[in-house]
Amino acid sequence: MNVKETGVRGLYELTPNIFEDDRGFFFESFNQERLTEKGINYDFVQDNQSFSKKGVVRGLHLQFAPYAQAKLVRVTSGRVLDVAVDLRPDSETFKQVYYFELDAVKNNAVLIPEGFAHGFAALEDSIFQYKCSNLYHKNSEGGIRFDDKTLNIDWGVSNPIISDKDLELPTLEEFERNFLN
């Protein structure tokens, strides 16, 4: 497994070494030792999986301390545009948006540290899996609207399918005013 630094503190792309032959393929989807070599030491305590139809946008989601979560995200079927937004006020990359295309052919993954909002758009019908460094806690969840004008995220889908819950999320300006001050 290759662990690629993105230039953003704590944000990494992971790409497995895939071994293929006429029977199929094999790869390691997770290897704690490879992460530890890079100084990454999360204890993942919960695994989640979702299915999204083509055109679905989920996010932008996060959890607040003390239930903040780092996430290791990947696609096991299909293809998504994965989006991470740095919401760490002390970060040099505060409010910057990062894009990764995750697909079930490349089998790449992204490690998103605590303090980032996260979402994705299903570019095809997709199964999305992710490991979390903390348990889900309903009263600690938060997020930012997918169509926030300041972030200006290009989700790569026309006519996105959005949940009612995600449509009620605050703008970045509202989020900053209510949660970061």
Image (tube, rainbow, N blue to C red):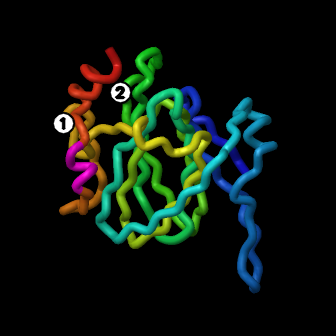
Task: Tell me which secondary structure the magenta stretch mostly adopts.
Answer: helix
Q: Which mark is residue 149?
A: 1
Q: Amino acid at mark 2?
A: Lys
Say which label, 2 or 1, has the lower sequence index: 2
Residue at image location 75% in from the left, 85% down from the top: 22
Asked if residue 111 shows in the view, the reply is no
> Quick check: 148 left or right of 19?
left
Outermost residue, front direction?
139
Judged from this view, the residue extending furthest toward the bottom is 22
Secondary structure beneath dot 2 equals loop
Please say whether residue 5 is one of the residues in the magenta stretch. Answer: no
* Image side of residue 101 versus residue 3, left or right: left
Q: Label 1: state its secondary structure.
A: loop
Q: Nearer the viewer, residue 90 or 156?
A: 90
* Closer to the camera in the image, 151 or 46: 46
Q: Residue at position x 72%, y 65% from top?
A: 18
Q: Is residue 8 above or below residue 82?
A: above
* Residue positioned 21% across, 45% down in the render: 168
Q: Amino acid at mark 1?
A: Lys
Query: Which corner quadrant of the image does residue 5 belong to?
Result: top right
Q: Quadrant of the C terminus?
A: top left
Q: Which residues are magenta?
A: 164-168
Which mark is drawn over residue 95?
2
Residue name at image x 29 percent, y 65 percent = 55
**Coordinates of residue 116 in the picture (x, y in percent):** 45, 34
